[in-house]
Amino acid sequence: MNYFTYQDNRLFAEDVAIGDLAARLGTPLYIYSARTLRRHYRVLSEAFKGTDSLICFAMKALSNLSILKLFGDLGAGFDIVSVGELMRCLRAGADPGKIVFSGVGKTDEEIEAALKAKILMINVESRPELHRVSAVAQRINLQAPVSLRVNPDLDPGTHPHISTGHRDSKFGIPLSQVDEYYAEARGLKNLELAGLSTHIGSQITETAPFAEAGEKVAKIIAGLRAQGIALKYLDLGGGLGIPYQEEPPSPAQYSAALLGPLRNIGLKIIIEPGRVLVGNAGILVTKVLYVKETDVKRFIVVDGAMNDLIRPVLYEAYHDIVPVVRREGGDRQTADVVGPVCESGDFFARERDLPAVDSGDLIAVMSAGAYGFVMASNYNSRPRAAEVLVEGTVAHVIRERDTFEDIIRNEKIVTLKGGPDA
């Protein structure tokens, strides 16, 4: 559920007319609903009620400081994958003791910053990383709480680019080497074996992969306990999908599947939701520039582009597209919705049946809150869109649109000594 609704055929974000926001702030424009964000967090929290658990928002999905503060105020922790994300969390007032650091390529500087910030734990994904964390912790004389990320070797049935739990993925350590890794970790200095973690992928729309992952993890925990290894945390990652087209499980069904084999595990459960919290809480509003007709196809050319929302070309992702102002009984048309960027992959939809539109009309690309703005770029020297957070009748600009000076801020023009043929 979200709070983007029609009132008298005009699309609203909560109690603010989207057309009014676009007229004031321009397009393309990202708009988020605070009411939707809070509701999604509370529904997910309710699904894990009665368990010792912590929700760590996977901030790679949407990292604006105001969004992070909103979740932090609700009690969330954060899943980070870079020192930049750590700095964002701290700037937004997050509790470092609720931050988990994931990712396969942590640098010495990132490990040191995380340990000095006293985060909850570092999810280690390889033998070299395990030794690197130990070495950094020794150098700065701190204990490093670590969790080993296990690759459960299962197919979650999602897009290959966002599937992380199969054997040939870059993520995690093989199931067959879990005991070996923990035994080795016990012998390293300045390490605290705090937990075990796993993550099987993103945009998963069935419960079976979560249940299978839970069963595998339960067996691992039992084996480690038999060896005298007592852990505190079990990080189960995220991955629950949202309804782009398919209807995913509810948070209650997700938690039941995930926790079924783990009800009496005796560890604090950490989950790392991203998309399920923010995906349907954001939209991208864009203006129709032209409706172009050829002898074989119709194109709706808009001012938004793949640099604003890359998911359709990167993941073959579907996003519902709706008019900001609905016409009663209007005509429909089949068209590609494309942007101005000089790439054939610059599209939001292909061969889509849509209400007829004219130049100057506004359309909304729905479910754009996750992996939307965070993956935006200045390709073709295009300014990144502004971001707006709506709460009731109030619209807060939480990121200004890029200016040309923003785009070139870190560039320098140098004068070379050689001539044209040098």
Image: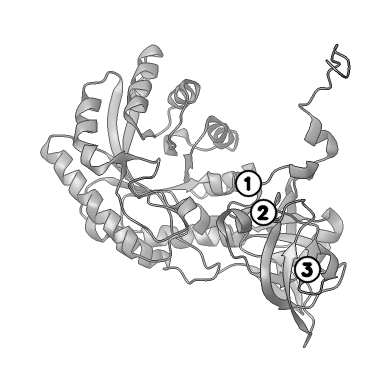
The 10 Å Cα crowd at callout 1, few under 14, some 14 to 19, many 20 or more, is: some
State the separation of the CA atoms marked 3 and 2.
18 Å
Q: Is residue 16 visible from the viewing direction of this image?
A: no
The secondary structure type at the circle numbered 2 is loop
The answer to whether marks 2 and 1 mark residues whose Cβ atoms lie closer than 8 Å is yes
What amino acid type is highlighted by mark number 2?
Answer: Leu
Could you tell me residue 111's position as x and y percent?
44, 25
Q: Is residue 77 visible from the viewing direction of this image?
A: yes
Task: Judge from the rendering whether residue 277 lies leftward or rightward of residue 289; answer left or right.
Answer: left
Mark 1 lies on residue: 375
247 and 44: which one is in front? 247
User: At 57% from the left edge and 44% from the top edge, which residue is drawn?
Assistant: 68
Which residue of the protein is positioned furthest toward the left in this rendering?
226
409 and 314: which one is in front? 314
Task: Judge from the rendering whether residue 72 lies leftward or rightward of residue 341; answer left or right.
Answer: left
State the separation of the CA atoms marked 3 and 1.
25 Å
Which residue of the protein is positioned furthest toward the front in this rendering?
421
**In this view, 329 is above or below 86:** below
| Quadrant that contains the N terminus | bottom right
User: At 86% from the left edge and 16% from the top edge, which residue is drawn?
Assistant: 415
Task: Judge from the rendering whether residue 103 lies leftward or rightward of residue 268; answer left or right.
Answer: right
Mark 3 lies on residue: 299
Q: Earlier in the sequence, mark 3 or mark 1?
A: 3
The 10 Å Cα crowd at callout 2, few under 14, some 14 to 19, many 20 or more, is: many
State the separation of the CA atoms marked 2 and 1.
7 Å
What amino acid type is highlighted by mark number 1?
Answer: Met
**Residue 309, label in figure:** 2
The secondary structure type at the circle numbered 3 is strand
